[in-house]
Image: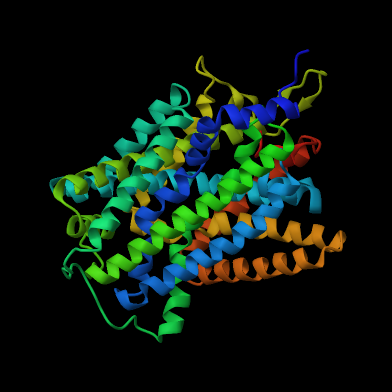
Amino acid sequence: MNQSPADPGRAGRVFRSRPVLLLAFAFAVMADPVSSVAYAVEAALRALNGDLGLLVATMGLVVAIIALVVVNYQQLIARYPQGGGASAAVGEAFGDGWSFVPIGALVVDFVLTIAISVSAGASAIIAYLPMLAPFRLILAVGLLVIVAGLTWFGHLGRLIFAFMTIAFIIIAVTVLIFGLSATPQPTGTITTSPGTGSVLAVILAFPVAMALATGVEAPSSAIAQLGQLDKNNRRRFGQITLWMTLGIVGAITLGLAAEAAHLQIGIPTADTTQIAELARVAAPPGVFAAFQLVTALLLLSAASSSFQAGPGLLKALARRQTTSGAFTGILPSFVGRTNSHFTPFWGVLIFAGLAIAVTVVGGGNDQQLVLFYAVSVFLSFLAGLLAMAYFSRREKRWAYLLLNLVGVIVVAFTLLANLTRGLPLISLAGALLIGAALYTLWRRAGRPEGIRQAESE
């Protein structure tokens, strides 16, 4: 007898017979958070005014906060093994209209991920080929156009993302191992005073590095693509992927921060990056070249991932007719049109235009753009954790409620700390305006049901 895709027997066999494919999918989902390591540590050091003595403590706090979010998102994945992330939780808890808060945050997050990834990719290339420094903006925009063009011809494939993620992890660990025996070579701007007291300096600096948290929500949505697994196995896959992400990103981040402090790698000059200078000092020339190449490719993979997810989200929100003859969706139907490669090409053009504008405003400098980052993703975290706290209270699960409330407080503090720097207010305003615009369209469309599942679709 034929078994359905969600049949438990078939799902179990998939886990046993195709572990390599599932592992590849897991590493592909990690592309965004792993790629953010390339610029997060430097962003923290810049916020610390070059004080290497506080760098490890700052990044340790960042990893600890991400761990708290991960613990809470374990509960969210357990509740929504079919996928959906924060928008599904918020929609169920407070009504579909509130789902547009995390959806608006996602749109901003996708645009910033594209812009920062191609800019950081340009920085990685310039660090190896300094003669390209005068063409930074042209290089960043050119990389963006190339990635958008490749996306136009269909998905690049999860296996490519997985390969780039694994390659970066292997080479990063290799660099760290070489660095253990390397001789310190003071490089860049190094200070012994962050400008304020040590504790206050760390508190003010860690929100800048919270770009490292981007992609943490990805497993909660990505599991929707595993239709061949039953709910229990999708839940297990999502939760394991979250812990793997935390372990790998946390270990590499803290390792790079510790070695930067040991080797005295300070704030770099304009034509290089801190992580590139660390690799240059720590490893042989061949390893350094490989590290820069893999870093650039991983960053472009992260941009490509958002180029797929963003237009896909717009397609899920586009007006369309269901099999029953009813109409659903809120955006103009042309947004959902696909080409022969099943790519929603109008969505690609929209995200390309927005990302190019952001890249130009930031001058193709990832360290300038990263100042706007993490606000939108933390807005999504906050909405999701508030929803989970609501469920825990309603179901009288007091231990979970305590965990959710601690998460809400920490995430809210991180969000507010970021907003005090001024520039991130633009990202917050953008996310809320997009959410409000989508909400207005939803009301005009007659409040169609299922909007909370747009992220999983």
Query: Total of numbered circles in the picture?
Result: 0
Return the residue nearer the eye: 145 or 298: 298
Residue sitting at the far bottom: 197
Instruction: Report which quarter residue 277 is drawn in.
Output: bottom left
Q: Is residue 65 above or below residue 128?
A: below
Give x and y (percent) for residue 231. 73, 37
Q: Is residue 237 above or below residue 416?
A: above
Return the residue nearer the eye: 31 or 6: 6
- Identity of the residue drawn at 67% across and 70% down: 406
Q: Is residue 363 above or below residue 152?
A: below
Can residue 265 be seen here? The reply is: yes
What quarter of the picture does the C terminus occupy?
top right
- Identity of the residue drawn at 20% across and 59% down: 282
- Identity of the residue drawn at 37% across and 43% down: 299
Give x and y (percent) for residue 273. 26, 57
Q: Is residue 227 left or right of residue 389?
A: left
Q: Is residue 95 above or below residue 6?
A: below
Q: Is residue 436 left or right of residue 60?
A: right
- Identity of the residue drawn at 33% across and 52% down: 173
Give x and y (percent) for residue 432. 62, 54
What quarter of the picture does the N terminus occupy?
top right
Display colour scheme: rainbow
Can residue 318 be seen here? The reply is: no
Return the residue nearer the eye: 236 or 185: 236
Return the residue nearer the eye: 126 or 167: 167
Give x and y (percent) for residue 229. 68, 31
